[in-house]
Amino acid sequence: MRFEFWLAKKYLSRKEAKFLKLISVITVLGVAIGVMTLLVVIAVMNGFDKELEEKILGINSDLLIKSEPVLYNYEEVVTKLDSLDEIMFFSPVVVGNGSLVKNGFLENIYIKGIDLKQEVKTTNLEKYLIHKLDNINSNGIVIGKVMAEKFDLILGSTVEVLMPFQFESFPFVVEGIFESGMYEYDASLVYINLNSAKDIFSISGVTSLEIKIKNPYKADVLKKEIQDILGVPFYVLSWIDMNKNLFQALKLEKTAMFIILCLIVLVASFNIASVLIMSVLGKIKDIGIMRAIGARAKDIRRVFIIQGMLIGFTGILLGTALGGALIYIIDNYKIIKLPSDIYYIDALPVAPSMIDFVLIVSSALLITFISTLYPAIKAAKFDPVVALRYE
């Protein structure tokens, strides 16, 4: 065992200076609470992010090909892209805005005309349908659960879809109800037959072509490859592009939360500095003797740096263990329940990440190390003659 480590450990285990040991214990607990809180909160935020990504990927396709004003002959696009192994399925769609009218009430809606057999291959619509549906008829409509409850609609109910700028309404029969878990979609998105959508929007092509790929997280890479193949006037959007503002807001929120919670560890590190300063003041005689018998300034500095790091490392280790245990309990036993009518999940989600774990532990170690520098440097600067003058 190196001399510096042995001496630092001895200073922490000595029976005298009980008050100093009490402060050390409090400091360890402070660091542990900070690290535990960071691990749990970031894991919970990752859990919500993962749930949100699943909902977005469930209702949207991985990639979207568009062309202004309308995408004609989309079959040619499919033929050009058939050679890409990463692509699994295609689905042509027609999208636009309208209004749903029922019993004198009007609600703005987002209309999506689809071929249901193709749509269920590119999205999770089939999974979200409350009642099994094989096809959407020319006068059929599929609405979200929130909208159905708002307008008191059931299967077989009749509604009117009013098209803007046309002053014309079209009757539809509710043939299906879906529940995606995203309020925005369940309250405003409706599906109709692809050909019916072409008729009410008065277009001969489609507005976009949806693509399902093997790995949604490679969407941005594949997007560039598809864009190079198709060229202008086509342009390609990934599911990340279509929700960029939302993901940027979540990333900013996670970063801000990480910084705020790091302040807990920072406050605990002030206690480490305090413990070391008190330890230095109590060990002036020892420092003088060690310097007198040949110990170098950097040896003294290392002793107190190691002493502080032992305190901090103990707190980090304890916090990591407690945080990991709490994450495991939350994930496996679902002890924190959530109102499913608000969040559409019944328990608090957690998704621990190894990258976040390394970042949190590394940040805590860095903060601890920085807090040891000032007391250690001051201890190393003691003149042995002055230190022993009054002893």
Image (cartoon, rainbow, N blue to C red):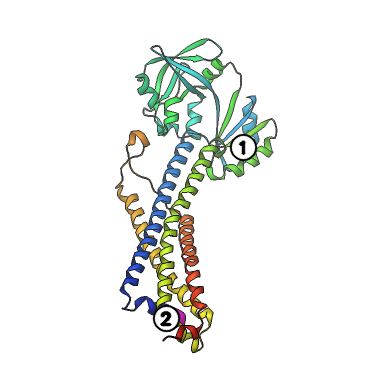
Q: Which secondary structure lies at badge 2?
A: helix
Q: Residue 108: horizontal and vertical position, in percent?
A: 47, 20
Q: Nearer the viewer, residue 35 or 111?
A: 35
Query: Which of the image's four quarters has the N terminus?
Result: bottom left
Provide residue 154's location: percent of width, then percent of height. Answer: 35, 20
- The region drawn magenta spans 2-6
Q: Which kind of residue does numbered mark 1 sit on? A: Asp
Q: Is residue 4 left or right of residue 28?
A: right
- Residue 251 drawn at (x, y percent): 51, 45
Work out whether mark 1 precedes mark 2 in sequence or the reverse, and give the earlier one: 2
Circle 1 Cα neighbour tier, 10 Å, few/some/many (<14 / 14–19 / ≥20):
some
Q: Is residue 264 at least partly visible in the picture?
A: yes
- Asked if 218 appears above or below 328 in the picture, the reply is above
Q: Is residue 314 above or below residue 323?
A: below
Q: Residue furthest front?
A: 390
Q: Residues within 10 Å of mark 2 (few under 14, many from 20)?
A: some
Q: Mark 2 — residue?
A: 7
The mark found on residue 50 in the picture is: none
Residue wearing tag 1: 82
